Amino acid sequence: MKLLITGATGLIGSSIIENTQKNDIKVHYLTTRKSKINSIPGAIGFLWNPSTQEIDIQCFDGVDTIIHLAGASISKRWTSKNKKEIFDSRVFSTQLLKKGLENSGTGKIKTIICASAIGIYPNSFHETFTEKNKILNENYLQEIVIAWEKESRKLSSLAANFSIIRIGLVLSARGGLLTKLALPVKLMAGSAFGSGNQWQSWIHISDLTRLFLYCATNNWKGLFNAVSPNPVLQRKLIKKIGKALNRPVFLPNIPSFILKFFFGERSILILGSQKISAKLILKKGFSFQFSSLDSALREIYNKKR
């Protein structure tokens, strides 16, 4: 395998590259900054600029697999400017990847895997969502992901195997939502948000990394949820984080109206509830190293000590 990856310096991308280096997989990556071209040991960087639709098509030389992760963080404030950046970074980068592939003259490649998010599913405290659920555009988060997937599907004609991975809450010691949830717990101020009964569909970063590469090596096609088989309620997640950090979680829940007042539309990131099924990836033969929340948190925090 020779891999081209976008979003290589992000939480997921950097973890995938670490894994590829252990398995002697050659890697090309795309970056918007010249200073980052030689920043990843053992990998070769190439410049692109989704805003101006410019790309070094040499990045495709010899590549048989593309993993497309690029996109601005959704955790930043949802100002008009930031919302445009979040949206455009996903749509424009996907459009440029398609344009670059078409202009490269490489023809159809073996595999393209595009990242997506479980935020595409509706908000529900009772329903379990599978890849077959009908999707409706009911909020800004869904609007982003629907547009992202729509552009991603246009890449399907350029690969023998095309798939979209809808990623859940990624648990990692290096960043992401877990570090934000853990900080108040460490400071003895841990608390659930709203009712605390929101479903949190999570996946350990190690399993997510393995899933992307398993998808590539096994020629998967279609939509797949990247979540563990054991989603949990948010109040349980916070308590489990407290247990893993040896900190009590005793404060009352933070009411929804307070969160909506301070975070506005963005409060959906902590008040939203999505119970997502992992049955399809299990049926496809993927096995989890960290299928329980206890094992995932134990690995993360033991590694940090």
Image (cartoon, grey):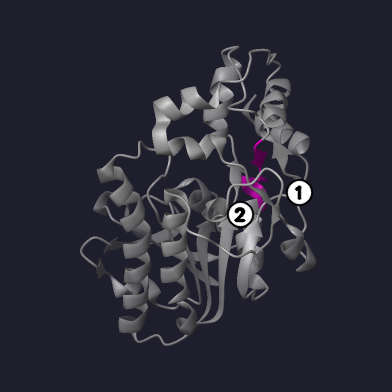
Say whether residue 232 is left or right of residue 133.
right
Q: Quadrant of residue 57?
A: bottom left
Whole-percent x and y of residue 205? 61, 46
Residue nearest the viewer, comparing 70 with 25? 70
**Magenta residues, start to end:** 198-207
How packed is label 1: few (under 14 Cα within 10 Å), some, or many (20 or more)? few
State the mark number for residue 209.
2
Q: Quadrant of the C terminus?
A: top right
Q: Contact, CB < 8 Å: mark 1 with mark 2?
A: no
Which residue is located at x 28 percent, y 62 percent?
50
Whole-percent x and y of residue 297? 70, 33
Q: Does the stretch in magenta take in 205?
A: yes
| Kind of residue sitting beneath label 1 | Gln
Which residue is located at x 37 percent, y 75 percent?
98
The residue pinned by badge 1 equals 289
Q: Quadrant of residue 107?
A: bottom left
Q: Can residue 182 be seen in this snapshot?
A: yes
SS assignment at label 2: helix
Whole-percent x and y of residue 19? 59, 55
| Kind of residue sitting beneath label 2 | Thr
Q: Quadrant of residue 244?
A: top right
Which residue is located at x 47 percent, y 66 percent?
149
Distance between mark 1 and mark 2 Cα atoms: 11 Å
Whole-percent x and y of residue 159? 50, 81
- Badge 1 or badge 2: first in the primary sequence: 2
SS assignment at label 1: loop
Q: Does the stretch in magenta take in 93?
A: no
State the mark number for residue 84.
none
Decide: is 162 above or below 18. Answer: below
